[in-house]
Amino acid sequence: MKILLVHNFYGSTAPSGENTVYASESELLRQHGHRVIEFTRHSDEIINRGIFGTVQGALATVWNPFSKRVLRFVLEKEKPDIMHVHNTFPLLSPSIFYATVGLKTATVLTLHNYRTFCAAGIPMRDGHPCMECLERKTTFPALKHGCYRQGRLSTLPLAVMIALHRKLETWTKHVDAFIALTEFQKSKITEPGLLSETVYVKPHFYFNAPDPLPWEEREQKMVYIGRLGVEKGVRILIDAWKMWSSEAPHLEIIGDGPEKSVLQESTKGNGLEEKVSFLGYLNSPEVQKRLATARLLVLPSLSFEGFPMAIPEAFALGVPVAASDIGAIPFIVKDNKNGILFRPGDASALYRAVKEIWDRSNWLSSLGRAARLEFDRKYTADANYEILMNIYQKAMERKKAKGTEYRA
């Protein structure tokens, strides 16, 4: 099978799980003998141009005729069976789906976030989940509250994009299959307009998982992995460690983001400086090394996440997960089976849940073993490939049914 993978990489200063997933799926397809063609853009192209780049990105977000034209040339030349898109924002735009009109190529879009109907991408406002735009099927709330980067002007291009492609029925007419990351996400994303029969659930996966490190060889530490933004709830995590005080185990915070300096400042002068380490952004092998030696991964998210890559990575390494009971996370982390759940946004609840499990080492290690079993059942590359091929087949069948003969 010939597959065209399409992706707009986010800026290199803000590493993204979407970029990681894109690279992993590309490698997965190649390993199974498929011919993979790539069509990519990088947000660094506009970031490095300052205000001119900002204007360029805003205009391209809604409808980029240049990307559509270039992609049409690639499609006509290569004649792929599938065009699998991961991210169109900001430089590609949904206009690229119109490049396949009249061609035999079926289209697939992975929903890494909620940006098809939510200007912020992450449905969250004022520190709480917000589904107003999805439930009301309008972008007026996003404009009213300036949901993207806390500004109405920066939100405008995204709001116009969402409204335009809802009006044009881009998602129902020009995308043959969508990939949601969890059943929770599927239920939320179909409410504002996607056809349920075109949305398929496929989680992330982890390549070549090593054997978990024996429990007795692991360090007495917990790990957080992710962006340091308000939506990730790391402030709540720090507050819980303040409650734990001098008896708290060591906590490694891996990641970077706008909250980093504030979070670092909050650990000074209260006995936490030796208990909490901010390691910043680390490359993937170093992250895996740090995670493999941990006894627990903590994810205190305040928002509806898609599918945090850190969870299957932790499961693969036999590390149980303590996470917020919110959004899609309870569909992945099963309370008292492969981890524990706590009330989101509540430092006391986080502290009590994590302390209880930390003080019961046998229980914690048994959850780690269950986490690895869960990985072997659901999150291996082989299992993921089978799901992906089924989705591709459904997309090609739908494309053919719409009146365009599929090229065998």
Image (spheres, rainbow, N blue to C red):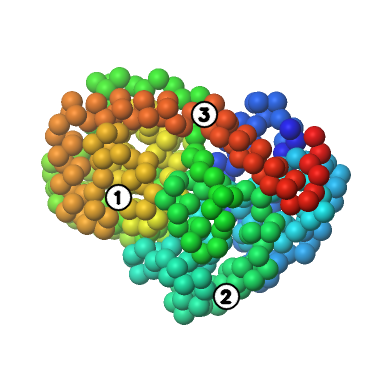
The reply, left or right, for residue 134 in relation to residue 362 is right
Which residue is disc 2 drawn over? 156
In the displayed structure, 126 sits above or below 230; it is below
Q: Position of residue 408 (x, y in %)?
A: 80, 34
Q: Residue at x 44, y 47 (%)?
A: 183
Mark closer to the observer (3, 1):
3
Q: Element type at marker 3?
A: helix
Crowding at mark 1 (Cα within 10 Å: few <14, some 14-19, many 20+): many
Residue type for callout 3: Ala
Q: Amino acid at mark 1?
A: Ser
Category of crowding for the residue at label 3, using alpha-carbon neighbours closer than 10 angstroms: few (below 14), some (14–19), many (at least 20): some
In the displayed structure image, the side of residue 401 where residue 249 appears, left or right: left
The mark that comes first in sequence, 2 or 1, is: 2
**Disc with the residue nearer the chain's start (3 vs 1):** 1
At a point 70% along the width and 67% down the height, the residue shown is 63
How far apart marks 2 and 3 lie (CA) works out to 40 Å
Identity of the amino acid at label 2?
Answer: Leu
Q: Residue at x 45, y 41 (%)?
A: 309
Residue 388, given in percent of the width and then of the height, sits at 59, 36
User: Could one spot residue 366 in this view of the protein?
Assistant: yes
Q: Which residue is mark 1?
A: 324
Give the camera-side residue of 184 and 94: 184
Between 52 and 378, the residue placed more toward the observer is 378
In this rendering, the label closer to the viewer, 2 or 3: 3
Q: Which residue: 49% across, 39% down?
A: 204
Residue 271, position in %: x, y?
17, 49
**Cα gap from disc 3 to disc 1, whole angstroms:** 27 Å
Query: Helix, strand or loop at disc 2?
Result: helix
Which residue is denoted by mark 3 in the rendering? Answer: 383
Q: CA distance from mark 2 to mark 1?
A: 31 Å
Which sits earlier in the primary sequence, circle 2 or circle 3?
2
